[in-house]
Image (spheres, coloured by chain):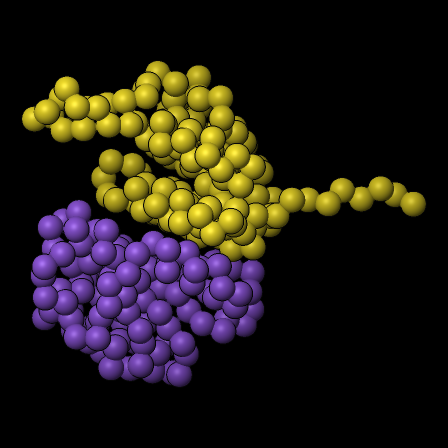
């Protein structure tokens, strides 16, 4: 929730996996497909979606023009740092997330 | 002419209702707070629900890091929160919801946190440029 209207870009943070995460990714893909600038950050349980072949929703999101990153701290914490990631997904840390969060015109949704 | 009071605003407010010790939510919020603070910005956390238990003085400074190695200490959540409040004095704030705290019998919080009635939540949101709601209802 932000006070900035209209949004110039969306920042979506997924920290869960499972059915609700699938719906979240479907919304993200719809936004990206509509031409919106959408950044997706996978953290906590959400990093499971970033492993190659796990999430068709992530593939659709990236195919729709969205950009996605995965939290390198969580990957290391769960011994997934060497796991194969979905094509197009990049690793980053909390610093980039803070930068994006603080950008004016960013609408953030944390799931 | 009537005097006006200019309210302080904060860059980010996190309303944290996700219960601790069940997911990575608390750790993620503390990491995000540190990253925001390292960018010379301001952030405060409104602790709801069981998060109000974290800052009780009775929990102390350390806890066992690993039950297989109980002699090696790790900081408690309260110590981590106090560390941020001390290191970034004036730019980080941890607010304990008094209703949630009282419901759970959580008393004697560490001195660095603020206690605030849930009746002040709307004003707290209004004083933030950006609010993140993290957790369930």
- Above or below residue B86? Residue B132 is below
Residue B6: where, in percent of width, then height?
73, 45
Q: Which residue appears at 65% of the width and 44% of the height? A: B8
Q: Which residue appears at 37% of the width and 55% of the height? A: A95
The image quadrant where one finds the N terminus of chain B is top right
Quarter location, residue B106: top left
- Above or below residue A85? Residue B58 is above
- Above or below residue A105? Residue B87 is above
Quarter location, residue B70: top left
Q: Which residue appears at 24% of the width and 63% of the height? A: A91
- Asked whether the viewer can see residue A27, the reply is no
Residue B129: where, in percent of width, then height?
56, 55
**Total marks placed:** 0
Question: Front-most of A11 and B92?
Answer: B92
**Which chain is represented by yellow in the image?**
B
Question: Front-most of A71 and A2?
Answer: A71
Quarter location, residue B117: top right
- Asked whether the viewer can see residue B39, the reply is yes
Residue A105: where, in percent of width, then height?
52, 68
Q: Which residue appears at 33% of the width and 60% of the height? A: A13
**Which chain is represented by purple in the image?**
A
* View extreme (right): residue: B1
Left or right, A51 with respect to B14, comes to left
Residue B11: where, in percent of width, then height?
54, 51
């Amino acid at each position: 929730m932000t006070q900035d209207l209209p949004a110039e870009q969306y920042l979506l943070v997924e920290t869960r996996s499972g059915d609700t995460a699938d719906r979240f990714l479907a919304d993200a893909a719809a936004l990206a497909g509509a031409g919106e600038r959408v950044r997706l950050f996978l953290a906590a349980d959400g990093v499971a979606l970033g492993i190659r072949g796990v999430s068709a929703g992530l593939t659709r999101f990236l195919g729709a023009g969205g950009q996605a990153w995965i939290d390198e701290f969580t990957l290391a914490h769960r011994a997934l740092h060497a796991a194969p990631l979905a094509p197009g997904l990049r690793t980053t840390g909390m610093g980039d997330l803070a930068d994006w969060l603080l950008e004016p015109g960013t609408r953030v949704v944390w799931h | 002419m009537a005097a006006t009071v200019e309210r302080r605003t904060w860059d980010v407010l996190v309303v944290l209702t996700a219960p601790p010790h069940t997911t990575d939510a608390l750790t993620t919020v503390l990491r995000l707070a540190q990253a925001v603070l390292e960018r010379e910005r301001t952030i405060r956390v409104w602790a709801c629900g069981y998060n109000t238990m974290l800052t009780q003085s009775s929990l102390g400074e350390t806890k066992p890091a690993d039950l297989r190695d109980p002699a090696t200490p790790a900081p408690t959540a309260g110590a981590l929160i106090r560390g941020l409040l001390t290191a970034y004095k004036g730019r980080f704030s941890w607010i304990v919801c008094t209703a949630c705290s009282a419901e759970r019998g959580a008393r004697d919080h560490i001195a660095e946190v603020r206690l605030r009635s849930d009746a002040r939540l709307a004003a707290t949101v209004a004083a933030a440029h950006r609010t993140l709601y993290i957790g369930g209802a």
